[in-house]
Image: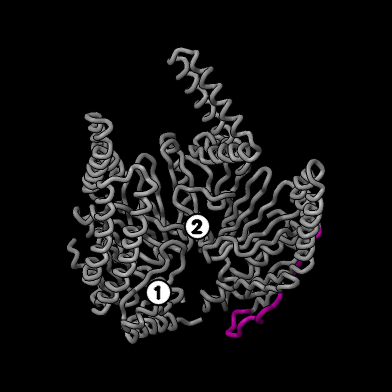
């Protein structure tokens, strides 16, 4: 069976999400590696007998790796992200190392949140958080939407749910 | 049922709901308070909890007596307050539970949202004629309201009325056209009970003997050590261990090893015996009956439990065979309603999910239609997973072996190559997993089968599916494999690993389409 037989989502996130992720992830990565290098390293060197140059290289590598990861992943994640409606289904496809394809019937969604953090507002972005009934993995997010787009999506979901007769 | 309820539930209902006029909103069907005997139990509880403090007070510091007194009064006070203020009301629409003095709270649970009704009665409560009523909703939090405790008669009445009211609502909503003809006969006498399964002592005994989880035993051991530590005996214990070592040292090594093995075996035997007794006590006299469209379970020796489970609420039925039980040809059947959450293969406390504690596999298969009406196991066209699964496992084994080898090479030298054995081992596990892996769509049901040495079967009504996810890990991406995860309300998601990407996508699309259709029909 050729994969073409199954429908795929086609819509992409806003391109602005890449700089947003770069700033957000990059900042936390820099903070974490900075703390490890300038605070953790002297402390370890002072109080841990096993500290050696080899360990120092490992730590440096880890710090650089963390920063590199934060810089490299956003474009890849953006390239992978797809979403879209197929009739009554919301389809998502995302992930780099672990690729997920998710299909959720709109009428099974319990409620929809529209979240905008301070940094997201600065970039003019919004995240849609959708909850279905259930415990684990019952909520999922669609990040990097323009505000109008997010509102439209939300209204679409609410409307589809509103069709129902009591 | 042995005793017909004095008030037929339908009498309280405007049974002529056939025409378009909705039934009178909020007609009160049942109302009541906790049973006064619960105060006696609470008194005992409070006494038991303060006993230790009193002992401390008498032996060491009189100061503790004051603390004990305060604690005792607070406990008793809250119990009395709860008893005086708690009131439950069942109407045609909802169950209301009101309680509290300073902070009044009223909980309203719409009847539609009630998944399960459970009764639980400990030995002491039973002696006093009391029953704890547990109300579960789909929130996933499990028990939403707990009425501790009602008199037996009140509890029975509540259940009868609730079930009647709910089936009435369902009929009113579902078969609006048919209701006209049926309206006159809406309140039938209690439906006859059909015995679906009754557990024999042999089955329960075997369940205990094949219970391989020593987790409970280990926990008890930890708790004991912690207690010893608190009392300050840990140091002395260390001394004992030292002594034991010296004592073992006087034997030749072979004898010492034999002694140690003997001790371990003894401990394991103890674990098996306790779990066997535990199982016998918990599931004593287990019966599963079907009344109308509602399943009911009754079991327990010391703490008796009763649980209703409307068939329409079942989200998933699993037939579980851990390796020892599979070897002997036995299986456990469990059903998830949207109430609780659990991992597959795991037991919840109280055995709430268990539908059949243990039975022969053919028998377990035979009673599936009683749980999932309309299921036809013969019509399932089983399909296998991909053989590439074996390659994926072997690949994982290679990575693991490389990691283990490089980590131990410095210390072990050439012996680190032993880690290479992981590769064939992992490939073997992959082969076994491939043999057990399967999926099928039959009628409105999806069946999933997986396991390595044991085997787990899950049957899901596709109409209840909340979401479908196809997931590819790094190895799976290399080999074109994918995992399929199906989410239903409540219980943990069901995961089917290592299908080909095409199969997984096709199946996911099919399930999602059916779920969407069903969701549209629900309203």
The one nearer the camera, B427 or B166, is B427
Q: Please state the chain letter of the residue tagged with numbered disc 2 in the rendered image.
A: B
Horizontal and vertical percent for residue B495?
36, 55
Q: Is residue B174 left or right of residue B477?
A: right
Q: Is residue B520 above or below residue B221?
A: below
Q: Which mark is residue A129?
A: 1
The reply to whether residue A50 is in sight is yes
In the displayed orientation, state which residue is furthest to the bottom.
A148
Q: Mark on residue B17?
A: none
Q: Please, is residue B204 above or below residue B371 in the view?
A: above
Q: Position of residue A102 (x, y in %)?
A: 32, 67
Give, as a single range, the part of the protein colored magenta.
B17-36
Residue, far front: A46
- Point out residue A163 in the picture as x, y percentages from the top left corner: 43, 83
Counting other residues with Cα less than 10 Å from the Cα at mark 2, is it few (<14), some (14-19), or many (20 or more)? many
Q: Are marks 2 and 1 on the same chain?
A: no
Q: Is residue B156 above or below residue B224?
A: below
Q: Which mark is residue B341?
A: 2
Main secondary structure of the magenta stretch: loop
Which chain's residue wears label 1?
A
Classify mark 1: residues with Cα within 10 Å, few (<14), some (14-19) or many (20+): some
Residue at image location 34% in from the left, 83% down from the top: A122
């Amino acid at each position: 069976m050729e994969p073409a037989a199954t429908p795929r989502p086609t819509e992409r996130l806003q391109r602005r999400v890449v700089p947003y992720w770069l700033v957000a992830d990059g900042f936390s990565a820099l903070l974490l590696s900075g703390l490890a290098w300038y605070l953790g390293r002297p402390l370890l060197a002072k109080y841990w007998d096993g500290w050696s140059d080899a360990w120092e290289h490992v730590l440096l590598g880890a710090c650089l790796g963390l920063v590199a990861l934060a810089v490299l992943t956003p474009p890849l994640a953006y390239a992978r992200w797809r979403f879209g409606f197929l009739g009554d289904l919301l389809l998502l496809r995302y992930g780099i190392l672990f690729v997920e394809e998710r299909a959720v019937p709109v009428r099974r969604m319990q409620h929809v949140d529209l979240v905008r953090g301070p940094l997201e507002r600065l970039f003019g972005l919004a995240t849609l958080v959708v909850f279905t009934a259930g415990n684990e993995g019952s909520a999922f997010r669609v990040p990097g939407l323009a505000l109008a787009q997010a509102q439209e999506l939300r209204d679409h979901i609410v409307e589809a749910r509103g069709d129902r007769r009591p | 049922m042995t005793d017909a309820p004095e008030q037929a539930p339908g009498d309280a209902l405007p049974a002529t709901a056939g025409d378009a006029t909705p039934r009178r909103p909020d007609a009160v069907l049942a109302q009541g308070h906790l049973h006064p005997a619960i105060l006696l139990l609470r008194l005992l509880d409070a006494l038991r909890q303060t006993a230790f403090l009193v002992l401390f007070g008498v032996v060491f510091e009189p100061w503790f007596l004051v603390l004990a007194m305060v604690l005792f009064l607070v406990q008793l006070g809250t119990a009395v307050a709860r008893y005086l203020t708690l009131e439950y009301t069942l109407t045609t629409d909802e169950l209301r539970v009101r309680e509290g003095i300073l902070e009044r709270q009223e909980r309203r649970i719409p009847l539609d949202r009630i998944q399960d009704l459970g009764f639980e009665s400990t030995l002491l409560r039973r002696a006093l004629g009391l029953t704890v009523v547990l109300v579960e909703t789909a929130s996933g939090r499990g028990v939403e309201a707990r009425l501790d405790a009602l008199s037996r008669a009140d509890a029975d009445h509540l259940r009868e009325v609730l079930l009647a009211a709910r089936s009435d609502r369902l009929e009113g909503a579902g078969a609006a056209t048919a209701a006209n003809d049926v309206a006159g006969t809406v309140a039938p006498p209690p439906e006859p009970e059909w015995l679906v399964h009754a557990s024999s002592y042999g089955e329960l005994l075997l369940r205990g003997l094949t219970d391989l989880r020593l987790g409970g035993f280990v926990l008890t051991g930890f708790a004991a050590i912690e207690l010893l530590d608190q009392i300050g005996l840990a140091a002395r214990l260390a001394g004992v261990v030292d002594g034991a070592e010296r004592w073992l040292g006087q034997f030749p090594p072979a004898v010492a090893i034999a002694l140690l093995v003997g001790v371990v075996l003894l401990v394991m035997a103890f674990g098996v015996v306790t779990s066997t007794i535990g199982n016998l006590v918990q599931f004593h006299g287990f019966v599963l009956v079907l009344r109308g469209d509602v399943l009911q379970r009754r079991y327990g020796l010391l703490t008796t439990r009763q649980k209703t489970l409307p068939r329409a609420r079942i989200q998933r039925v699993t037939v579980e065979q851990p390796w020892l039980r599979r070897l002997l040809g036995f299986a456990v059947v469990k059903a998830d309603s949207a109430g609780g959450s659990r991992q597959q293969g795991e037991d919840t406390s109280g055995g709430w999910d268990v539908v059949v504690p243990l039975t022969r596999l053919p028998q377990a298969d035979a009673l599936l239609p009683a749980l999932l009406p309309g299921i036809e196991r013969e019509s399932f066209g089983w399909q296998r997973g991909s053989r590439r699964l074996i390659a994926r496992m072997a690949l994982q084994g290679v990575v693991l072996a490389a990691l283990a080898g490089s980590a131990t090479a410095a210390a072990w030298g050439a012996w680190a190559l032993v880690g290479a054995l992981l590769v064939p081992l992992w490939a073997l596990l992959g082969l076994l997993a491939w043999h057990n892996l399967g999926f099928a769509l039959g009628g409105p049901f999806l069946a999933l089968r997986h396991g390595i040495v044991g085997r787990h079967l899950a049957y899901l009504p596709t109409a209840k599916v909340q979401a479908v996810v196809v997931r590819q890990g790094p190895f799976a991406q290399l080999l074109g494999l994918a995992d399929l995860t199906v989410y239903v309300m409540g219980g943990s998601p069901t995961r089917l690993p290592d299908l080909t990407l095409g199969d997984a996508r096709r199946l996911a699309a099919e399930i999602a389409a059916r779920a969407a259709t069903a969701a549209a029909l629900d309203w």
